[in-house]
C-alpha cells in the first residue's frame, strides 16, 4: 500500500514559478482534447481553426485584441480585489453598471462641450462600477455580510435594473426591443487602425495594467492592500485602517470592471442592449487566477482566453464542435492552475507502507 | 360569495406556487448545509445545479424515464462533489476558488453537452414532466388544502428530507461526527475520526442534493432546459444557509418565505401593475441581500469552514 500526503517543499526559484501558468495552459489544451474528440471534431483541424480563427489573418488577430480589452480590465478588477481578499465575484454587475452609466452620459451629452464627452463616459463609467462594488465592501466591513454572496447577488440586481431601464426611460423611442438609442458620436471610442475594430480601449487596458502594477508595487496603498489580504487582523493591529483599504480596493476594482463596460458600449455596441456582456465579469475571475493575481499575468491570461473565445467561433463553424468549448476550457484552466499553484509550494509525498 | 371564492383560490394558489418556487432551493440548501457543516463552503453549487438540470433533462428526454433523470442528476452532482472534495479537501486548495472553478466548469459542460446533443433548435425540446399528486383528504381542506397538499413527488421528498436532515445532524452519532469535523477538525482527528473522509463524503452527498435541485427545475417546475434556468438560485441557497444559521429547519423556513414572496411578486406582476417586470424579478435578490444583512450580525459560522485540514500543519 501507498500512503500519500502533501508536504511543504523548498521554495521554487522565480523563473520556475513563472513557468507555472505556461504549464497550466499547455495542460489545459491537452485536457480540452477530450471534449473535442467527444464532439467528434478532427483534432488537428480543430486546433488549426482555433488558432487560425484567432490569429490567422490581420483582421482575426485584431479582433482577438478587441476581445482582450474587456477581459484585461475585468481580470485586473478581480485580481486587484482578490489580492486584498475582497472576494469580488461581482465584476459582471460592475461592468454593467459602467456600461449603463456610459449610456446615460453618452446619450445626454448633447449640450456640453463635445471634446469632454469621451473623458466623461470613462470617468462616470469608472465611478459607477466602483460605487456598485463599494456596496458589498461596506456591507462586508460594517455589517459582516459575506462578500462572495453579496457581490454575486448584486450582479443579478444590476442586470434587472438595466432591464427595467431598457424597457423604460432608456428605451429607444419607437423601438419595442430592450435597447437604448445610440450615444453621441464624440462619446464613441476612436478606431485606431483602419479596416478593423481596434479601438482606444485596447491601449487603455494596457495602461491600466501598468497603473495596477504601479499601485501594487510602488505605492503605500498597494502594500497595505496586500497586507490586508494576507492577514486582516494583523494589519489592523499594525495600524492599517483595514476598512478604508477594503473600500478603496473595491472602488478601484469595480471601477476597472466599469471601464470594461464603457469600452463594450462606446467601442463595440454604441447602444445599450441587455446582453452587452457574455459573462466577461465571470471570465475575469478565471483570468485573475490564471494570471496569479499579477497584472502582467492577467495581461497574458487575457490574451490566451481571447484567443480561445475568438478562435472557438471559427472552430465551431468549421468542425461542428460547439463554441461553448471556450467555456469548458475556462473551467479546466482555472482548476488546473489552482492545482499547479499548489504544487509550487507543496509536493506529493508517497510513502510505501 | 364570489369574492370569497376568489380570495380562497388566490391564497391556495399562492401557497402552492410558493412551495414550488422554493423546492429546488430547498434541495440545494440542504446540500450546502451538510457540506458546510463538515467545514467546506461549496461555491460549485450554481454550476452543479445547472449540470444536474441539464443531465436530468437529457436523460429523461432520451429515455422517457423521469426517475432515471433525477438519478442521473444526483450522480452528476456527486461527481462534481467528488471533484470539489479532491480540490478543497484532499489538496486543501482555496474553497472559494475551487468552488468557483467547479461552477465555471460545470456551466461550460452543461452548455457544451446540451448544444452537442440537441443543437440549437428555435423551439427547445420538452419532456413530459412530473405530475402533481394530491394527498387524499388533506388536499380537500378548505382554502389551504390544495396549495399545501397537491404537489410533485419530489416536493414531498424535499419537505420530508428537512426533518430527516435535522435529526441526522443533531441526534445521531454520524451527525455529531460531521459537526465536529466542521467545528474542530483537530478534535475529531484526535479521537480517531477520518476528517478527510468525512468531509469528502459530505461534499459528495451535498453535490447529489444540488444536482437533484437542478433537475427539479427541468423535470417538474418546467419541462425544458434553458441556459439560465438556475438564474442564481444556487447563490440564494448559500444566502439561505447563512440566514438559517446552518440549522436545516430555520434555513428551509427562510427558503419557504422566499418562495412565497417570489410567488407573490409573480402574481402582483400578473395583476397588471404599472411597474416594470424587471423590478419584480429583481426583488428576490434584493430581499436575499437584506436577509443576509439581518442574519449576518448573529451568524455562528462552523469554526472550521474555509480552513483546509492538513495533519502536517500540526506536526510542524
Image (cartoon, coloured by chain):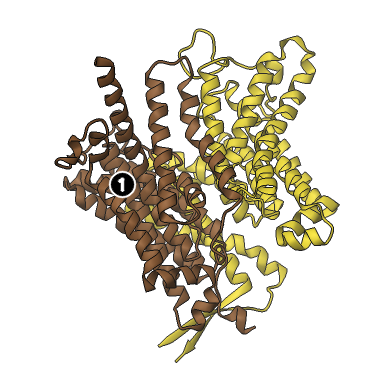
The one of B136 and B120 positioned closer to us in this rendering: B136
Image quarter (top left, top right, bottom left or bottom right) of the C terminus of chain A: bottom left
Image location of residue B198, percent across then percent down:
42, 72
Label 1, residues with CA under 10 Å away: few <14, some 14-19, many ≥20: many
What residue occupies the far top of the structure in this picture?
A174
The one of B166 and A195 positioned closer to us in this rendering: B166
Image quarter (top left, top right, bottom left or bottom right) of the N terminus of chain A: bottom left
The one of A170 and B118 positioned closer to us in this rendering: A170
- Residue at which label 1 appears: B215
Residue B183 visible to the viewer:
yes
Chain identifier, colour yellow: A
Residue A342 lies in quadrant: bottom right
Image location of residue A103, percent across then percent down:
63, 21
Q: Chain of mark 1?
A: B
From what the image shows, is residue A184 above or below residue B94? above
Chain identifier, colour brown: B
From what the image shows, is residue A96 above or below residue B304? above
Residue occupying image coordinates x 52% and y 22%:
A164
Residue occupying image coordinates x 28% and y 25%:
B8
Q: Is residue A161 left or right of residue A328?
A: right
From what the image shows, is residue B272 above or below residue A255? above
Q: Is residue B298 left or right of residue A203?
A: left
Q: Is residue A218 left or right of residue B126?
A: right
Residue B230 lies in quadrant: top left
What residue occupies the far front of the structure in this picture?
B1
Residue A277 visible to the viewer:
no
**Secondary element at tag 1:** helix
From what the image shows, is residue A304 above or below residue A230? above
Image location of residue A32, percent across then percent down:
43, 55
Q: Is residue B39 left or right of residue A97?
A: left
Amino acid at each position: 500500500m501507498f500512503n500519500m500526503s502533501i508536504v511543504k517543499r523548498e521554495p521554487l526559484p522565480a523563473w520556475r514559478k513563472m513557468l507555472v501558468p505556461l504549464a497550466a495552459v499547455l495542460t489545459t489544451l491537452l485536457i480540452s482534447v477530450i471534449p473535442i474528440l467527444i464532439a467528434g471534431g478532427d483534432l488537428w483541424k480543430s486546433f488549426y481553426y482555433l488558432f487560425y480563427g484567432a490569429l490567422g489573418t490581420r483582421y482575426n488577430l485584431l479582433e482577438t485584441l478587441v476581445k482582450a480589452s474587456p477581459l484585461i480590465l475585468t481580470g485586473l478588477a478581480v485580481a486587484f480585489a482578490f489580492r486584498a481578499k475582497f472576494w469580488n465575484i461581482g465584476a459582471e454587475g460592475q461592468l454593467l453598471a459602467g456600461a449603463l452609466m456610459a449610456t446615460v452620459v453618452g446619450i445626454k451629452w448633447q449640450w456640453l462641450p463635445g471634446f469632454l464627452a469621451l473623458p466623461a463616459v470613462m470617468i462616470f463609467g469608472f465611478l459607477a462600477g466602483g460605487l456598485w462594488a463599494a456596496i458589498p465592501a461596506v456591507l462586508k466591513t460594517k455589517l459582516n455580510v459575506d462578500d462572495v454572496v453579496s457581490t454575486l447577488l448584486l450582479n443579478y440586481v444590476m442586470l434587472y435594473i438595466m432591464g427595467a431601464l431598457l424597457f423604460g426611460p432608456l428605451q429607444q423611442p419607437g423601438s419595442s426591443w430592450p435597447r437604448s438609442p445610440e450615444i453621441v458620436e464624440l462619446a464613441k471610442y476612436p478606431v485606431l487602425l483602419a479596416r478593423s475594430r481596434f479601438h482606444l480601449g485596447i491601449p487603455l487596458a494596457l495602461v491600466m495594467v501598468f497603473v495596477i502594477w504601479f499601485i501594487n508595487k510602488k505605492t503605500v496603498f498597494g502594500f497595505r492592500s496586500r497586507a490586508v489580504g494576507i492577514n486582516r487582523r494583523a494589519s489592523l493591529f499594525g495600524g492599517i485602517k483595514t476598512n478604508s483599504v477594503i473600500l478603496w480596493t473595491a472602488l478601484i476594482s469595480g471601477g476597472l470592471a466599469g471601464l470594461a463596460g464603457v469600452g463594450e458600449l462606446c467601442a463595440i455596441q454604441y447602444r445599450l442592449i441587455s446582453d452587452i456582456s457574455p459573462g466577461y465579469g465571470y471570465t475575469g475571475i478565471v483570468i485573475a487566477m490564471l494570471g496569479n493575481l499579477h497584472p502582467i499575468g492577467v495581461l497574458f491570461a487575457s490574451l490566451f482566453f481571447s484567443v480561445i473565445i475568438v478562435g472557438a467561433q471559427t472552430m465551431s463553424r468549421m468542425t461542428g464542435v460547439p463554441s461553448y468549448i471556450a467555456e469548458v476550457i475556462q473551467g479546466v484552466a482555472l482548476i488546473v492552475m489552482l492545482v499547479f499553484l499548489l504544487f509550487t509550494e507543496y509536493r506529493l509525498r508517497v510513502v510505501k507502507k | 360569495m364570489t369574492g370569497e371564492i376568489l380570495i380562497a383560490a388566490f391564497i391556495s394558489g399562492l401557497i402552492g406556487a410558493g412551495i414550488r418556487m422554493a423546492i429546488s432551493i430547498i434541495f440545494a440548501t440542504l446540500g450546502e448545509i451538510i457540506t458546510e457543516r463538515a467545514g467546506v463552503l461549496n461555491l460549485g453549487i450554481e454550476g452543479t445545479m445547472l449540470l444536474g438540470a441539464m443531465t436530468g433533462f437529457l436523460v429523461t428526454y432520451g429515455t422517457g424515464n423521469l426517475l432515471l433523470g433525477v438519478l442521473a442528476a444526483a450522480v452528476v452532482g456527486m461527481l462534481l462533489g467528488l471533484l470539489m472534495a479532491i480540490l478543497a479537501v484532499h489538496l486543501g486548495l482555496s474553497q472559494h476558488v475551487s468552488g468557483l472553478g467547479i461552477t465555471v466548469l460545470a456551466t461550460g459542460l452543461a452548455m457544451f453537452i446540451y448544444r452537442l446533443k440537441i443543437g440549437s433548435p428555435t423551439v427547445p425540446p420538452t419532456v413530459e414532466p412530473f405530475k402533481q399528486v394530491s394527498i387524499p383528504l388533506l388536499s380537500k381542506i378548505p382554502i389551504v388544502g390544495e396549495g399545501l397538499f397537491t404537489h410533485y413527488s419530489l416536493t414531498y421528498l424535499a419537505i420530508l428530507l428537512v426533518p430527516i436532515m435535522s435529526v441526522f445532524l443533531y441526534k445521531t452519532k454520524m451527525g455529531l461526527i460531521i459537526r465536529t469535523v466542521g467545528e474542530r477538525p483537530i478534535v475529531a482527528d484526535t479521537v480517531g475520526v477520518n476528517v478527510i473522509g468525512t468531509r469528502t463524503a459530505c461534499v459528495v452527498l451535498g453535490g447529489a442534493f444540488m444536482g437533484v435541485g437542478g433537475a427539479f427545475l427541468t423535470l417538474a417546475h418546467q419541462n425544458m432546459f434553458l441556459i439560465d434556468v438556475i438564474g442564481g438560485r444556487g447563490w440564494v441557497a448559500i444566502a439561505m444557509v447563512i440566514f438559517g444559521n446552518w440549522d436545516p429547519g430555520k434555513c428551509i423556513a427562510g427558503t419557504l418565505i422566499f418562495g412565497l414572496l417570489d410567488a407573490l411578486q409573480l402574481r402582483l406582476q400578473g395583476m397588471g401593475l404599472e411597474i416594470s417586470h424587471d423590478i419584480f424579478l429583481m426583488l428576490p435578490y434584493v430581499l436575499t441581500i437584506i436577509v443576509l444583512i439581518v442574519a449576518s450580525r448573529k451568524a455562528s459560522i462552523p469554526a472550521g469552514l474555509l480552513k483546509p485540514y492538513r495533519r502536517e500543519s500540526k506536526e510542524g
